[in-house]
Image: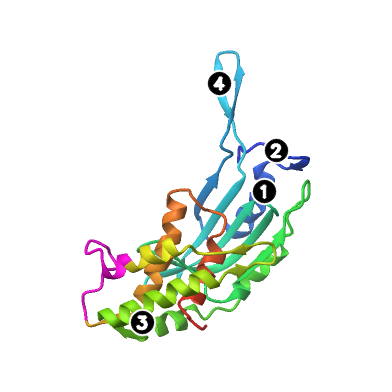
Amino acid sequence: MEGKPTIIGKKAYFKTANYVQPFFDRLKPFTDDFRIHVQTPEQITLTQQGQQVTTDTTYNRIYIEAVMPDSKYYDDHDKVIGMVMGIDVRKPVVKFYSGALNSACTNLCIFNPTHLSIQALDPETPIDFRPLEDIIKVEDDTKQILEKLHEQKFENNLPRREFLLGQWVNNAILMDWNNGFQPVKISTDNVISAYKSLFIDENSQYYQVGNFVNMYDIYNAFTQQITNMVTKNKDVFSVPEKTLLVSKILQINP
């Protein structure tokens, strides 16, 4: 709320509160659980008044999750409504989405492209929050999809694992998620890290020891890579698109 107005190039943007306060106002009737991730510019100035020095902060990328704690989907998943904003990217945009948040690992699930709305963020222009109203009301089949992922199983043997790894890496190379503004990709490094957590790293929470592995565990091993990037503050901007892209790479059909 203390983020200052900013100018990038010749384009001016409002203070942060102008953009995010309407989101909070619309979601406060449903929840008081908001998870906030932000990225500031690499360089921050200091303002001195007398002997007091304060940071002169603005926020270029913002990722807010409003968690609906009383609306369990399936297997400890909560409904979540999200807002993502970026002004220091090639085409500044704001995104609204509806998904499910795994309460055990905080991984996000989004399976349906209609659960994501993206619009241009024009300089000195308020955000149009009407798409958020539609996202809040959108019908959801997440529970049914999660159930199917639990039921879809693969043999846990070396030939099958090698086949899946090759398929996933190939899909990651060839596939992206075009949101209408810029394509979003998942790196093959993320695919390999997910594979290692499933079949190599015995200390991983996703490590598979049985004769079969189900798609639910595979999906979470992949979305964990996205969660890790948010936790490390490496990427808070492309979470919804990368989450949708995971389903394409794994060939999950809603």
The quarter of the rendered structure image containing the N terminus is top right
Kindly indicate whether the residue at mark 2 contacts the one at mark 1 (C-beta within 8 angstroms). yes
Q: Which mark is residue 53?
A: 4
Q: Which residue is mark 3?
A: 150
- Residue that sits furthest to the top in the current view: 50
**Residue 103 lies in quadrant:** bottom left
- Compare marks 2 and 3 and give the one earlier in the sequence: 2
Q: CA distance from mark 4 to mark 1?
A: 27 Å
Q: Residue at x 65, y 46 (%)?
A: 88
Q: Nearer the viewer, residue 12 or 194?
A: 194
What is the x, y in percent for residue 246?
48, 71
- Compare marks 1 and 3 and give the one earlier in the sequence: 1
Q: Which residue is mark 2?
A: 6
- Compare marks 1 and 2 and give the one earlier in the sequence: 2
Estimate how packed mark 3 is, as few (under 14), some (14 to 19) or many (20 or more) residues with alpha carbons within 10 Å. Answer: some
Q: CA distance from mark 3 to mark 4?
A: 54 Å
Q: Is residue 29 visible?
A: no
Q: CA distance from mark 1 to mark 3?
A: 39 Å
Residue range in magenta is 196-210
- Residue type of the residue flagged with mark 1: Ile
Estimate how packed mark 4 is, as few (under 14), some (14 to 19) or many (20 or more) residues with alpha carbons within 10 Å. Answer: few
Side (left or right) of 152 relative to 5? left
Q: Nearer the viewer, residue 4 or 11?
A: 11
Q: Residue at x 52, y 81 (%)?
A: 141
| Eye-nearest disc, 4 or 1 | 1
Q: Which residue is mark 1?
A: 87
- Residue type of the residue flagged with mark 4: Val
Kindly indicate whether the residue at mark 3 contacts the one at mark 2 (C-beta within 8 angstroms). no
- Residue type of the residue flagged with mark 3: His
Q: Is residue 26 visible?
A: yes
The local secondary structure at tag 2 comes to: strand
What is the x, y in percent for residue 14?
72, 42
